[in-house]
Each structure stands twice: as structure tokens, then as C-alpha cells.
Image: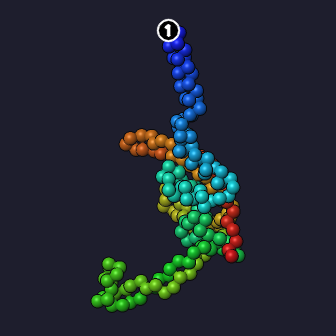
Amino acid sequence: MKLLNCVLIVLTLLLVINVQARSGIGGLSGGSSNGKIRDLLQESAELGRWDVVREVVAKKDKFTLSGDRVFLGTLVSAFKVCIEGDDFRSIEKHPVYKAEYVGVSRDYNDGRRDGWQDVLVGHEYKRYPIVYTKYEEKCSNSGKRCRKVEKVVKQDSLKNITVKEHVRTLGRSNPRKIYEEVTSESYEISECN
């Protein structure tokens, strides 16, 4: 009887150790959900399925995209632009407004009551050149002598996009988020149809 109890205890221990070894970090359910999401993000980025990557990043607050910005008058996502000649062009049309004088008595939409109202006049694509000139202010002598310097900027059509995962936050009074890189892949902005 005593021998049978010892054998049962040994078999139970072996079974528990075997189950723990096979279950991994996430238990018997098949691993942690963050590990599965990381695998999905890595695989999708390698295959060029950026729609899946963007959908997962939009749904999960732990993940962020970086390196996907293009200047189109304002910073926009590289997934929302295409190349048309020497310009970047938005894929979707945007509303165009015109300020019209309507009189103070009819101006009630914008909250300023100055007599002017923005009226929708149509929709058009946003465009911005790939190579453009901007002016930077260079100062010397402790900011007393400043001048504007012309600078030529060339935007790349090949973007190196990085997906990062929020790992932890350090500090209490001045918190700083720590991110870990999940994957980094290239994305080529395509020609417009």
C-alpha cells in the first residue's frame, strides 16, 4: 500500500512537470496573447501586408508605428499618399472651404460672429512636391543677429517603418515610456492610379 502511494505521487509529479513544460508562458491556452500579436505583426510586415499591421496597431494601445510620415503641407501617413509626377498626392480628396461674407446676423456656425463664414466649395487632392525648399532661421551672437537660410529638402519614397511595443513606464513624477522594437521593414510609396 505504501509503495502504491509513492508510485502515485511520483507519477503525479511527473505529470505536473510535463504539463508545465508543455504549457509555456501562457498556460495551456497556447502562449501569451502579446506573443501572438508580435508574431502576427512581424509576419505581416515581412509579407508587405501593411493593412493588417495598421489595423492591429490601431486596435492595440501597446503598439506604435514610427517612420511612416510624409510632409504634405502637414504630416500625414505614408499609407495615405501616392506619387504623381514629382509630387506626393493624397489618395483621398479633402474638402475645400472659402471664406464668404454673409453678414453678422447670419454668421452663427463658427462661433466668432464676425460676419464671415467658411463655405464648402468642393473637394480636391492635397499635393506637395517631393523636393521642396524651406527656410530656417540661423542665429548668432546669442540670438541678436538672425537670418533666414534656404534649405532644400528631399523626401524619400522608400520609408523604413518600425513597429514598437510599449514594454514599461519608468518614473512616477515624470514618467517615461520604454518601447521595444518588434519589427522594422521597408515600405515603398506607390504611383497613383
Residue for point 34% across, 81% down: 109
Decide if residue 86 is on the left or right side of residue 103. Answer: right
Residue 89 falls in image quadrant: bottom right
Q: Position of residue 149 (x, y in %)?
A: 60, 66
Q: Position of residue 147 (x, y in %)?
A: 55, 66
Residue farthest top in this picture: 2
Residue for point 56% across, 40% down: 30
- Disc 1 marks a residue whose amino acid type is Lys
Q: Position of residue 60 (x, y in %)?
A: 50, 53
Q: Is residue 179 visible?
A: no
- 49 or 115, which lies in front? 49
- 3 or 47, which lies in front? 3
Sort mark 1 into few (<14), some (14-19) or many (20+) by Cα contacts within 10 Å. few
Residue for point 50% across, 49% down: 62
Against 167, is 18 above or below?
Answer: above
Please give the residue where the numbered disc 1 appears in the rendered image: 2
Q: Position of residue 137 (x, y in %)?
A: 54, 64
- 21 or 176, which lies in front? 21
- 82 or 138, which lies in front? 82
Against 17, is 118 above or below?
Answer: below
Residue for point 59% across, 73% down: 90
Residue farthest left in this picture: 105
